[in-house]
Image: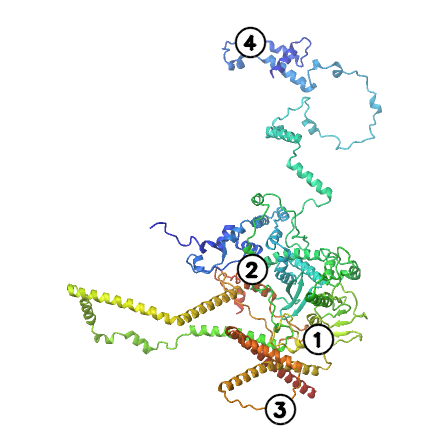
Amino acid sequence: MGGLQKKKYESGSATNYITRNKARKKLSLSLADFRRLCILKGIYPHEPKHKKKVNKGSTAPRTFYLLKDIRFLLHEPIVGKFREYKIFVRKLRKAYGKAEWGGVERLKENKPVYKLDHIIKERYPTFIDALRDVDDSLSMCFLFSTFARTGKCHVQTIQLCRRLSVEWMNYIISSRSLRKVFLSIKGIYYQAEVLGQTITWIIPYQFAHDHPTDVDYRVMATFTEFYTTLLGFVNFRLYQTLNLVYPPKLDGQGEISLKSEFEEDYALESESYTEKLSALSASLARMVPSAEEEETELDHFPTEGEDLEKMEVREKMEQEQIKQKKFFEGLKFFLNREVPRESLAFVIRCFGGEVSWDKSLCIGSTYDATDETITHHIVDRPSIDKQYINRYYIQPQWVYDSVNAKILLPVEEYFLGVTLPPHLSPFVEETEGDYVPPEKLKLMALQRGEKPQTEEDEEEEEEEEEEEEEDDDDEEDDQSEEEDEANLAEMEDKRSRGKSLSVKVTPGKAKAENRKRAAEEEKAEEKRLAIMMMKKREKYLYDKIMFGKKRNVREANKLAAKRKAHDDASKEDKKKKKKKC
Amino acid sequence: MAAARKHKRMAASQPGFLSFNSGLDGNSSDIKRRKRVNKNKKKNWNKYSDIQDVEEFLDDVRLQEKAAGGLIAEKPDASLFFVDTGEKDKETQPQTTVKKGKRSKPLRIDLILQPDSRIPAPKNVLAFQQPNAKKQRRMAEKAARLAAMGVLPRREKLLQLRRAAAASGLPVKETPVANNNPARAFYDLWSAGTPEMADPYYLEQTKQKLVKRPDRLNEKPSVLPAIEVVGPGGSYNPDFFSHQDLLREAHEVEVKKLKAEERLARQLAVKEDIATEESSFKEQVEGLIEEGDVEPEEPEGGSEDTVIGPTATQEKKTEKQRRKEKAQRIKELRRKAERQMIDKQQQLFQLRSIRANLKTQEQRTKQRQAQRKANQEAQKSMPRRLGRLKFQAPDLDVQLSHELAGSLRGLKPEGSILKDRFMSLQKRNLIEPRERAKFKRKYKVKYSEKRAFREIV
């Protein structure tokens, strides 16, 4: 027969993949450099479908890359830079060894550096692409900026991260784009909406660092290197869109108001400006000093009928949003020294509030604790000795909860020394039939504009009632359906057994027509008919869906009942304690 | 040289020539008897010709040149003589007013070493010779030619550029800045620059344009979001039930782990029936005691039987037998065909069941397809096996009920965000799972007590 015998592993998936070591040799880089290159260029290892084929019959676990990816890497200019750097290190070591200090100086002056600009342009061809991927870089920058300067990473990197994160926060403040805040046990989650993209990031609590040992710092530093470059360019562009000066400058008013005579106590002359920027208490300078903020108005197009209605609705929504964006406006906050200053200042300023703190706490305080116009004093200690009568003393959670609810919550539950209501996650979105904690229900009621009753117990009762009502409604629906079906079945049964239905004629009564009731009945009837007309398959699906819904409701009910029991128990406990007291 | 010598000789022959050592003239005049030698050899010329007088004359000329800077005969009289008019300057010169220091007067030894010859030392020609002079001359010529045509050399061009840049106020040379320099500048990276007009192939080959990034690389290896927000139970001040949910979740994880551990322990446990003395003895004697009873003959008998099986001496089939067999075969075939016919006819009546069968089959394939698709979708968010190690999900960060702080001030953060991020990168298949390199000692550590310590103990 014709043809040469086909050899194994000379075509197909075996030739599409390359092991990490081979790739490394092909690029003539060390493993560390190869890792760095892959991270910077966004080339990730790949798991082949048939490992044994790719591995030429061996089953040893290996890291594989696509051969085409590695070929693409060969064109990268920074590969050359890596090699140059290797040589630089060698020369430097030699010079040190020979104690040629002049040579060391000269070498250090000509240290080879590389740029990542072209890689960023290549990986994110448009600005929106970059913005979509900025979550990671934000989290990393905020994380690295909180590192102590202990040599785990470059001090310069820490400084750069700090600068970029401050720039980002300032942008979020001046664009008013913060949406959600969540204080978790890990750190603080923020979510903002920037140019239509939802961006989430996490910030660690201050002073919460123990350096874990099982993290590869070199890999993280490489990611950070890439992400800082990305975030820098994104920041620049964002500042441009708002007409802000980049690098950020405080505007004239802010600069004057922040000037204090004790600046030298906080920072060096060279650093005080950046410190002031990072205090977040003053607004930024704009390229074109515009007359306040131009409020964006939707374009009006002449439309008819439904569109007009929709437009109105949309307009309403827009206005509501604008209102929500500045619901702290006109309020003056003062932060006591035990609360997390940066986070609170950021959140308050994001919604238009004014904020200050003790002069000795940080640079950039704008007014004193003795200021009479302060409306809210944020304290996180059980009691405070000197209190002003014209301001609220509240715990910091009030600010975060208000932001998540997008309204000013009643302050009573957040007063000094009061047990706080739970801090709910704004990232949870309940679907229909899920269990909703009563606190959230209350919140939703507040958002709808309903006035809560003053006494707590009453409120709770009301909620419970509400809940029960809702549940009852559901149950009623179900019941009515079931009843209808049962009746029908009975009738049919009778008909089939049939023959003699007991027929009687009785004098008629004028039925009081309840139009509303009638309409409802009609609707129910229609629904029932529609269910009857369903195909078998659809019916099956429908039943399944209904069953799932019912199950959800049942579970929610169970949870609610549990909650009630729990609340009752805790209430009783309280009462007992009171009695004891 | 020859010309100079001739000139000097001519000078000597002139009537007015004065010789410095004229007194020697008389001594040289005694005549020796000339020796006869062959004059066809240069050696002999040097050896036997008498050049005493010439040498003397030349010495004299040299002396004159050294002392007076030329032949005295040729000097003008004014340079040789002066009119002595007595000492009248001596009185006018201030003798004692300026007392010169020791320094101003040169040392005698220096004076001795001073060259007193009036003839300048000959130039060292080699010292002034330029290497590659010819080449450079040619290059200079070429540059001049090009300059005449208006083409400047590179260095000149760069210089002019630099000057122009300096004049325009921009920094002369942008020193490369490190990536992590906190003061580094950023610019609008995504602004639409001037589109390249040149041939893309040319640009690519000259490395002015990078190779296009394949679109495949812009896909993310996992569909998981970059930041996974913890559930509502992870709040610092959680709702009771969501906190319980979180605790239950963590508990389930722990239970699963424990179960796996237990299973492993069970599998690795030593079996209960450990060999006792009795059993081991039994094992040792096994086969020894009953050996006498077993008959070793049986296999032989069996082998004989097997030999009998295939008969070598089979008789030939008779014609009748063959016929019968053939008829049988035909009959069988016919029967089969008939059966097939009947089956086919029967199938007409089975149509319903066949259709039902087909339907169930189809349904099953569809179900499987859906299942497979769902599996593939689920795979997209799963961590892949990328290296030696499998991804292991980190422990859930949980605070027990008594650990929860009532206020923000008392909050103790749980877990590390750095670790969280690192794990997220692994989970999203951006890097392969890794573990810290283990420390391996090359040699064994040898402990020895110090003597001082030993003395105490």
**For numbered disc 4, what is the local secondary structure?**
loop
Query: What residue is shown at x 57% (from left), y 8% (from top)?
Result: B31
Q: Amino acid at mark 2?
A: Lys
Give the mark toward the camera: 1 or 2: 1
- Foreground residue, A317 or A136? A317
Pick whichever, B317 or A562, lies toward us: B317
Q: Please identify, in this view, whether the residue under mark 4 or under mark 3 is nearer the observer.
A: 3
Res A507 label: 3
For the residues beneath circles 4 and 2, the answer to whether they share a chain is yes
Local secondary structure at mark 2:
loop
- Which label lies toward us, 3 or 1? 3
Across and down, in percent, residue A547 comes to 54, 77
- Pointer 4 and pointer 1: residues touching (CB < 8 Å)? no
Query: CA–CA distance between discs 4 and 2?
Result: 118 Å
The CA span between labels 3 and 1 is 54 Å
Q: Type of residue at label 1?
A: Leu
- Residue indicated by mark 2: B220
Whether residue A412 is situated above or below residue B12 in the rendered picture: below
Give the Cα separation between the discs numbered 1 and 2: 41 Å
